[in-house]
Image: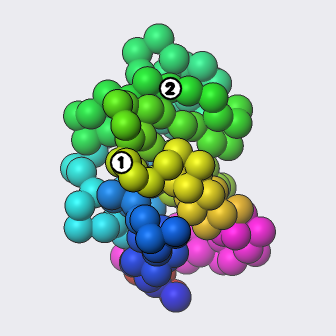
Amino acid sequence: MSWQTYVDEHLMCEIDNQRLTAAAILGNQDGSVWAQSESFPAVKPEEITGIVNDFNEPGYLAPTGLFLGGTKYMVIQGEAGAVIRGKKGSGGVTVKKTSMALIIGIYDEPMTAGQCNMVVERLGDYLIEQGCLESVLRYFMISFPSFEGQGL
């Protein structure tokens, strides 16, 4: 299954007649885009650096907020080192970290934060459970740099 299929069929799936506004899977080392929905905003390297820093040092983004595609989200409760959640008006963002990737979902009403969390975290948990798969992918990405982002 390709990374784009994970975005299209899992992150952008319909939940209670609602779906994410945008979603992406990025490499957690360099922020490279492995797959994204058409509506996912262009992210800046410093935005990804901030997210990675918050996973490594929980609370890092609390004073400044989480920026994604130039949009500022207030950081709310998450799971230290595993999940970052942000809120802006009636919408927000959930970021789940795996050993290789950042799974990102952006939502607006009428979708709820809980629905977004469920979609993003479920895929992230699945990928974490497939740890041996991630190890194989890491090997290929290191050995064959042109493989990155191609999925299986």
In the image, 59: left or right of 13?
right
**Residue at image mark 2:** 75
Quarter of the rendering containing residue 50: top left
Q: Position of residue 70 (x, y in %)?
A: 23, 34
Q: How many marks?
A: 2
Is 16 covered by the magenta stretch? no
50, above or below 18, in the image: above
Q: Which residue is depicted at the point 51% across and 75% down?
A: 10
In the image, 36: left or right of 81?
left
61, above or below 16, in the image: above
How far is disc 1 from disc 2 in space, using C-alphas? 16 Å
The kind of secondary structure element at disc 2 is: strand
Q: Which mark is residue 145?
A: none
Is 139 covered by the magenta stretch? yes
Q: Which residue is depicted at the point 52% across and 88% down?
A: 1
Q: Mark 1 and 2 residues: CB-CB less than 8 Å, in contact?
A: no
The kind of secondary structure element at disc 1 is: loop
Q: Which mark is residue 108?
A: 1
Q: Is residue 3 visible?
A: no
Quarter of the rendering containing residue 91: top left
Along the line of sight, the residue nearer the viewer: 136 or 62: 62
For the record, the magenta segment spans 126-148
18, above or below 152, in the image: above
